[in-house]
Image (cartoon, rainbow, N blue to C red):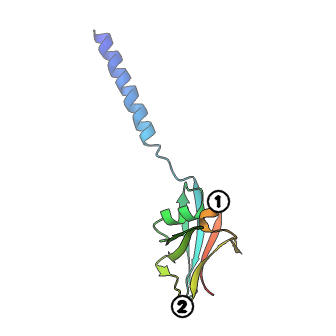
Amino acid sequence: MKQQIRRILALALVVLALAAIFTGCAKKPGKALTVDVTHGDGTTKTFTVKTDAENLGTALVEDKEIGVTGEDSDYGIFITTVDGEAASNEEQTFWSISKDGVDLEVGADSQPIADGEHYELTLKTW
């Protein structure tokens, strides 16, 4: 009887130890992007976006620090606000997206991302 109680206690300890190990191994985001935001006044702020998203649009919207919001369109998100500054039809401004200084040829939702990439969001006029 005592031996059976010891086995049960040992099994319970093993289960608790495994649960503690796996609970401590919370999944961390697999990708980190650097995003430079250039505001209308020319000031630039750099953000590190950590994400498991597959595309740039989702990564930007999910990251609350950078504060990207936008409108859904047939082509994905149309970015309207970044870091508290909104684009404006009246002022003829829009948020331009580039990667390593080269303008993207697709929208943010169509841009696949990989760890370590560098993007720029710049408020421009048309």
Residue 64 coordinates in the image, percent (x, y): 45, 66
Residue 121 coordinates in the image, percent (x, y): 59, 75
Q: Is residue 119 visible?
A: yes
Q: Marks 2 and 1: in contact by CB < 8 Å?
A: no
Question: On the rendered image, what quadrant is the C terminus found in?
Answer: bottom right
Q: Which residue is mark 2?
A: 91
Q: Residue furthest front?
A: 74
Left or right of residue 21, residue 110 in this image: right
Label 1 sits on what residue type?
Pro
Q: Which mark is residue 68?
A: none
Q: Residue 59 or 45: which is nearer the viewer?
A: 59
Left or right of residue 53, residue 18 in this image: left
- Rate crowding at label 1 as few (under 14), some (14 to 19) or many (20 or more) other CA atoms within 10 Å: few
Q: Which residue is mark 1?
A: 112
**In the rendered image of this protein, does residue 84 appear above or below residue 35?**
below
**In the rendered image of this protein, does residue 66 appear above or below residue 1?**
below
Q: Could you tell me how far apart the alpha carbons at marks 1 and 2 are, in whole angstroms?
A: 31 Å
SS for callout 1 = loop
- Rate crowding at label 2 as few (under 14), some (14 to 19) or many (20 or more) other CA atoms within 10 Å: few
SS for callout 2 = loop
Label 2 sits on what residue type?
Glu
Tell me which residue sits at (51%, 51%) in the image. Answer: 28
